[in-house]
Image: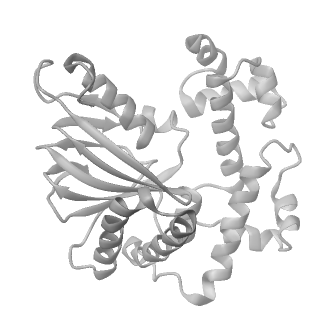
Amino acid sequence: MSEIPLRDRFGAWCELLSATHLAFAVDMVSGPNQEFAADVQENRLGAMSLLRTSVFPHRGRRTRRQVTANTRDVIGLHFIESGRQAVELDDERVILAPGDAMIWDGAATGDYEILEPLTKTTLIVPRSLAATALPSYRRSFVQTLPRDHAPTRSLIQVLSVLNDQLPTMADGAREASALLVTELLRPLNRLQGGDGPERARWPALQLRERVLDYIDANLDDTKLCPNMIATAHGVSVRTLYSSVDGLGMSLGSYIRHRRLARSHDDLLFGSEPVAVVARRWGFASPAYFSRVFRDRYGIPPGRLRRQRG
């Protein structure tokens, strides 16, 4: 970012933060001419991404508006390498220092403040994978992780090594690393109020992952429903519902949630009429599509298309 003019650096950081992490309303903590610098290095790790961020002091807040406009359904884990960060947790201000770690949900609202030049590592995990690796996690949570928790320390050590090694790793090594990190996430499940994924529950968790992948691959099928999904996986509808327990919403709501996200992307980046986009993603009624889209994103689909134009 050093090659960007000083006056444009903060705006560039806002765009970079939204692209690599999540959207925040971001403010400088001092005057507009204050020196500012930021850098993000991103590496893919299977379905996850690993980020190493260095950034100067600033403030950010994630309101319900940013959450409802979000199309990235993720949770994240980050730990502080240097510097200090303040986070609002349940109306309490918590200071994170070097060695501290926290886990957050992209559906959560809250504030943060970078108090001094900060370097941190962040693991971004899709919700479908998080629901498998952390089956007892609570939707919309933000939680600090205890320093004396050995599995957390092990995960941090592995991520620190991967930060340096991933850019030069072969594809096979990357895949093996992704599997290792997924396994290292599992002990964190106990910190979310569960007893951990015992071996007897693994088949159910694997079913959940397959079901969520199947839903994403068939969102454009107007016949997509619980009966169709259950039949495709050779299980009863009751077993299907049990497998997706923990998503924080019903199965039908999850399907609608994913279809709206696809519709949002098509309207934002495509050129087809709103009605065509709605039909593609299973919304036969334009009025219904407009209502649920507005409820989700705070703006009617037609206005989103006009604003983009």
Q: Residue shown at 11%/44% (left/top)? A: 116
| Residue 288 found in image quarter | top right
Q: 80 above or below 301?
A: below
Q: Nearer the viewer, residue 169 or 154?
A: 169
Residue 42 placed where, x, y %? 41, 48
Residue 175 placed where, x, y %? 56, 67
Q: Quadrant of the C terminus?
A: top right
Q: Quadrant of the N terminus?
A: top left
Q: Residue shown at 82%/27% (left/top)? A: 285
Residue 48 placed where, x, y %? 50, 57
Q: Is residue 267 visible?
A: yes
Q: Nearer the viewer, residue 278 or 262?
A: 262
Q: In the orientation shown, which residue stands out farthest toward the bottom?
A: 200
Q: Residue shown at 15%/61% (left/top)? A: 98
Q: Is residue 284 left or right of residue 152?
A: right
Q: 114 above or below 290?
A: below
Q: Residue shown at 19%/35% (left/top)? A: 58
Count of numbered circles in the view? 0
Rendering colour mode: one colour
Residue 262 placed where, x, y %? 67, 37
Q: Is residue 63 visible?
A: no
Q: Is residue 34 left or right of residue 308?
A: left
